[in-house]
Image: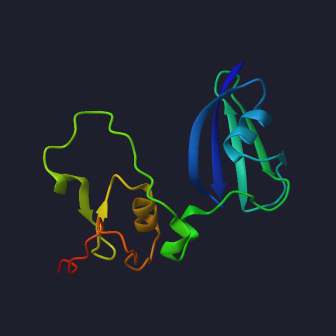
Amino acid sequence: MTKYQVEEIYGDTIVVSGIVVESDPLKAAETLAGQPLLPRAAQEHWFRAVDEEKTTVHEYSLVGPDQRPDLLAWSESADFGPSMRGKVHEAELANEQDHFYNCPACGQRVDQRDFRQVYWHEKSGHEPLQTQSATILSFPRPK
């Protein structure tokens, strides 16, 4: 098994990068892509697998359309479904308010323990998230 540095690329921008241990570079790239790949064609969306030990670079493209869900493309709070709580890996924060931050783009309070809210507020140009949840509090944007 070989360790590959695998990157997902749009144009010239790396959007995802990770280390994958696999028997060949195509399998490593498909692990990151989550779907079948072929040797790279002239596409803007592509994958690169680098074997740093052998100093080889392999480039791949998707076989068909991207089949993965675009988590940042959700436009309605109904798309989110039930809350997705993360796990605490260190000591619990002493103050409940320490779990929140103000989104720099829209000013809304974001509960960092709810992945749905974090994903929503990562989308560039987003509006405040409309939800019935009591855990999201909306405050005026800082000036």
Q: Residue at x 57, y 38 (%)?
A: 18
Residue 116's quadrant in the figure?
Answer: bottom left
Q: Residue at x 47, y 69 (%)?
A: 123
Where is residue 8? Give x, y as percent: 64, 50
Residue at the limit of the structure toward the left, as seen here: 94
Where is residue 53? Give x, y as percent: 65, 21
Q: Quarter of the image containing the N terminus?
A: top right
Q: Residue at x 64, y 27 (%)?
A: 52
Where is residue 13? Give x, y as percent: 58, 57
Where is residue 134? Give x, y as percent: 29, 69
Q: Please, is residue 138 above or below residue 115 in the view?
A: below
Q: Nearer the viewer, residue 103 or 78?
A: 78
Q: Quarter of the image containing the C terminus?
A: bottom left
Tell me: 63 left or right of 118.
right
Q: Please, is residue 61 above or below residue 28 in the view?
A: below
Q: Nearer the viewer, residue 60 or 116?
A: 116
Q: Nearer the viewer, residue 118 or 81?
A: 81
Residue at the limit of the structure toward the top, as seen here: 1
